[in-house]
Image (cartoon, rainbow, N blue to C red):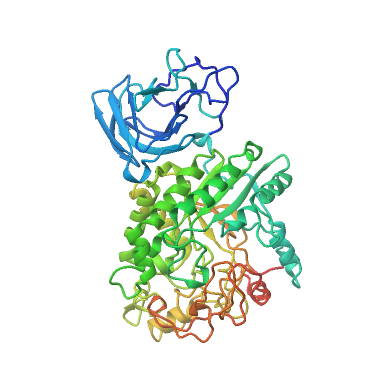
Amino acid sequence: MSRTRTALLAAMALVAGATGTAFAVDPGSAGIAAVPCTVDYKIQNQWSTGFTAAVTVTNNSAAKSSWSLKWSYAGNQKVTSGWNAKISQSGAAVTAANETYNAQLATGGSVSFGFQGSYSGSNAIPATFTLDGVTCNVDGGPGGPTDPPDPGGPANRVNNPYEGAKVYVNPEWSANAAAEPGGSRVANQPTGVWLDRIAAINGAGGKMGLRDHLDEALRQKGSGELVVQFVIYNLPGRDCSALASNGELKADEIGRYKTEYIDPIKAILADSKYSSLRIVTTVEIDSLPNLVTNTGSRPTAVPQCDVMKANGNYVKGVGYALNKLGDVPNVYNYVDAGHHGWIGWDDNFGPTATIMKEAATAEGATVNDVHGFITNTANYSALKENNFTINDTVAGKSVRESKWVDWNRYLDELSYAQAFRSQLVSAGFDSNIGMLIDTSRNGWGGTARPTGPGATTSVDTYVDGGRYDRRFNAGNWCNQSGAGLGERPKAAPAAGIDAYVWMKPPGESDGASKQIPNDEGKGFDRMCDPTYTGNPRNNNNMSGALPDAPLSGHWFSAQFRQLMQNAYPPLS
């Protein structure tokens, strides 16, 4: 939220249905003496009987080894739960005291916490706060100054950011595409920009940084609306089940993730210079579903995923990112929701929605910080399988019994995304959430594309002969042989779907096919090795990966040419 210096005695009443922030003039304000502390009290979400609030306290006096903030409500507000502080209430009086991990409060330092509460009637911002008995927000005058809600704030986001808008074309990806024979046919397509390490924020290896892309987006925008897409992808212990995309941060470096990665991104996105852009973030792909499918006693379990489930840093990291980025009024957060070949089974489907809700209410985030979800990011699952249905029976067996479907309830991404959207709403997300589907590499066209179902001699010949997706197994994810460009990006293509997008830039590798020393934190995963015979996560099938692949994110010319050749719809 933007901040303006406000006359100290200015005040406004906040009635039910309004949101706002109470804060004191900062110590540097001309002509006003420094105050010992300031309080930013922001109502993040409010409904007819309850609300959530985020509070940030800044200490302008001597450093503290512990702290206690107190305030009183003028109405009947009751705190029902809280996080990052020990919160108690007696009548109208509320006390928030430090936890052990945030007890230190340096001079000039800040600490944040949040809570959920109930109310009826009005829900006014408290007029006075005291930090360890000293009044904040007041300089001898009555009441506490307030900052009105920002115009065009989160409540004013459009329902579907893609409708009526152009989408940003990354000039770096466009140049790589155009340099390939025939690449000019797709070089003007919009793709996601991946912020996959701290250095990417300012530009790594001579590439454009976040501000560079935003400045270019303003140039492309002109007088209309424009969406610019960023992938937020740098969790501690990132991608615990796929070594090719492991990141730079160790499993316990949640502090660095917050202060060195998310906070700088938020600061840039919040620059008023970019307020006219619609900024879509895809938040931390391949993270939360790992906590469901690749932990515990399952055959697919990976020790690194057990670590991330135990330390909670995936949940905390996603929650922190949603909270901070969700404060920027023109940012639309879409959380990664895997794909049908990962989450479509009964024992994965519901639990994944549940952990999405857990992350969306962690670290001060609320479900209102989530605009939607994205499926099939950087994956290959077909958008729609037309040659058979999940209800077909062949030779006395259901299609679900085939080796390819393997009892999954979904055959393709469109049916999965629409069904998972309903599950997410049931889990507590807003009924207006929208879904994105990454169609960058799921076309499966070319001469091998089936034109009808397979032979009915068995359920396997029926499914295998008719399926567009020609992977050995739906769990294969690395540089897949035979893949093609999918549906071109478009807004509102189907019920509940905000857009088809190319979030993964076609032609950028999923991982190296052999060990390549690097300073990007990227390991070698055998799933990127064409000779690999598999593991329980792909039912011990061949990897299906292309040979001679570079590190993940690096340009892979042979893959891009294959994607164009097998595009569906075909390229003209």
- Asked if residue 357 shows in the view, the reply is yes
Image x and y of residue 336, in percent: 47, 57
**Which of 348/404 is in front?**
348
Depth order, front residue of 239/565: 239
Q: Position of residue 498 (x, y in %)?
A: 53, 50
Q: Is residue 179 left or right of residue 86?
A: right
* Image location of residue 546, percent across then percent down: 58, 80
**Residue 411, how many percent across, how many down?**
43, 69
Q: Residue 5 is drawn in which quadrant?
A: top right
Taking the view exactly as shown, the residue that stands out farthest to the left is 90
Q: Is residue 391 visible?
A: no
Vertical arrangement, residue 400 with respect to residue 308, above or below: below
| Nearer to the camera, 184 or 57 | 57
Q: Is residue 320 left or right of residue 354?
A: right
Please tell me which residue is depicted at 33% across the width and 49% down the height of the picture: 426
Q: Residue furthest top?
A: 141
Taking the spot 62% from the left edge, 47% from the top edge, the residue there is: 227
The C terminus, quarter of image: bottom right
Which residue is at a point 57% across and 42% down the rendered structure image? Answer: 267
Which quadrant of the view contains residue 47? top left
Q: Is residue 177 left or right of residue 461?
A: right
